[in-house]
Image: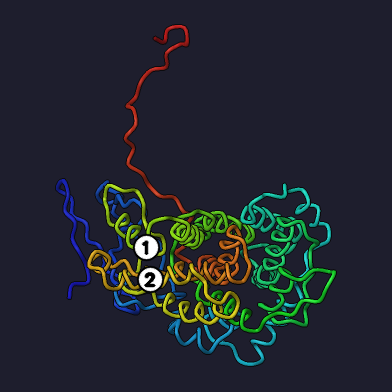
Amino acid sequence: MSDSARIEFDGQTFEAEVLTGTEDERALDIRKLRASTGLITYDPGYVNTGSVRSAVTFIDGEQGILRYRGYPIEQLAEHSDFIETSYLLIHGELPTTEQLETFRQQIIHHTLLREDMRPLFDAFPRDAHPMAIMSAATSALSTFYQDHYDPRDPDDIQVSIYRLMAKLPTVAAFAYKKSIGQPYVYPQNSMRFTENFLHMMFAVPAEPYQVDPEVAEALTLLLILHADHEQNCSTSTVRLVGSSQVNIYAAIAAGISALWGPLHGGANQDVVETLLEIRDSDSDTASFVARAKDKNDPFRLPGFGHRVYKNYDPRAKIIKEAADRVISKLVGDDPLFAIARELEDVALSDDYFVERKLYPNVDFYSGLIYRAMGLPLDMFPVLFVLGRLPGWIAQWREMIDDPETRIGRPRQIYDGAGERDYVAIGDRG
């Protein structure tokens, strides 16, 4: 097997070393391509471009494999909790009992927001999207901890990790309470991570609130399944912004903004809206499937297919089982869930979907679970943020520690106007 590849152009020869990863992934090292040949690569969306070497997450889209730090997602979903999975992603290994307890207690210690942050939430209009509030408040956190955000100081990094893991659920809950006109509910440090978040979301001062353990278990599962997914749009954004050595709060805020997009974190919202459209239509499910297959019809079925997975998304299998339990308990017979299962049956048996490998993805059932919990559509990507947070932190930290990291600066192919002379405004036609 060759350990290099040769590129010949205009009399020049470039030998590109072939790099091989742990799982036999191979890549051409083209760092010196432009210096040797004057050429750059053209790769819209970076779909064939590896910008980093990472030890955080492995995905095999053809086989439907997802592993965090080598551990299969199926095992983590069954045996781990979100804080332990977060520790694994951020620190690289599963914690000992003592390490996990210290990590958990440090997060608990930092759950409160500074009281002088409250006016920030009050200043937003009531209909402000929670993702806008999340991004702004996360960036604003850096102004309250300016003495502890140096990305080159290990102690600053560690305390910033605790603060982000602890405070973003509080930020998310405050954003939700602001949107519905209810009083903010402060964290209860006697509760576990997920229970505490649900309490801040749904409790009110006027009456007691009991967290449903099955709902907490389902939310924990969703957070684990969303915790990292390699170099996706928001993760790449965190790395790109972080490569300038800005503080971690600003880098995470940028990731939140990237995740807000409907092609990324907003996909599960699109799924629920489409299911509602099907439910309220005079047409049956088959007619919507036919529309999705019609190349002349712009309609598409969200929640099917994935940029990476060309097999059944392993997370979707796990979520479907959780959806069955939670929706049955909280909603009973949910017509949207029935439509979703009918659509999945079509996708797994219809030649059009099978040939194009359009299997249900992680977004297909997650939105239905959030809806059953009583969350409005615009909170769906916020839950995605809380799940993805430890992955962003792990990727940012890896980027900071990597001696090969350079400030992100993609090249381009310029195809604008050639050189031309300035024309005075009175002489322009």
Q: Point out residue 328 in the picture as x, y percentages from the top left corner.
A: 54, 79
Structural crowding at the residue carrying mark 1, measured as other residues with C-alpha within 10 Å and reported as few (<14), some (14–19) or many (≥20): some
Would you say the residues marked 2 and 1 are in contact, meaning their CB atoms lie under 8 Å apart?
yes
Q: Point out residue 115 in the picture as x, y percentages from the top left corner.
A: 83, 61
Tell me the element at label 1.
helix
Q: Which residue is nearer to you in this view: 244 or 265? A: 265
User: What type is the residue that disc 2 sits on?
Assistant: Glu
Q: Which residue is nearer to you in this view: 409 or 98? A: 98
Residue occupying image coordinates x 43% and y 75%: 316
Mark 1 = which residue? Answer: 285
User: What type is the residue that disc 1 sits on?
Assistant: Thr
Q: Is residue 273 left or right of residue 122?
A: left
In the rendered view of the protein, which quadrant contains the C terminus? Answer: top left
Distance in Å between CA atoms under marks 2 and 1: 8 Å
Residue occupying image coordinates x 19% and y 56%: 7
Mark 2 = which residue? Answer: 342
Q: Can residue 171 be seen in this view?
A: yes
Name which quarter of the figure residue 23 lies in: bottom left
Residue, far top: 426
Tell me the element at label 2.
helix
Q: Which residue is nearer to you in this view: 93 or 233? A: 233
Q: Point out residue 210 in the picture as x, y percentages from the top left corner.
A: 74, 80
Name which quarter of the figure residue 254 lies in: bottom right
Dot 2 or dot 1, earlier in sequence: 1
Q: Point out residue 63 in the picture as x, y percentages from the top left corner.
A: 30, 77
Q: Is residue 236 left or right of residue 256?
A: left
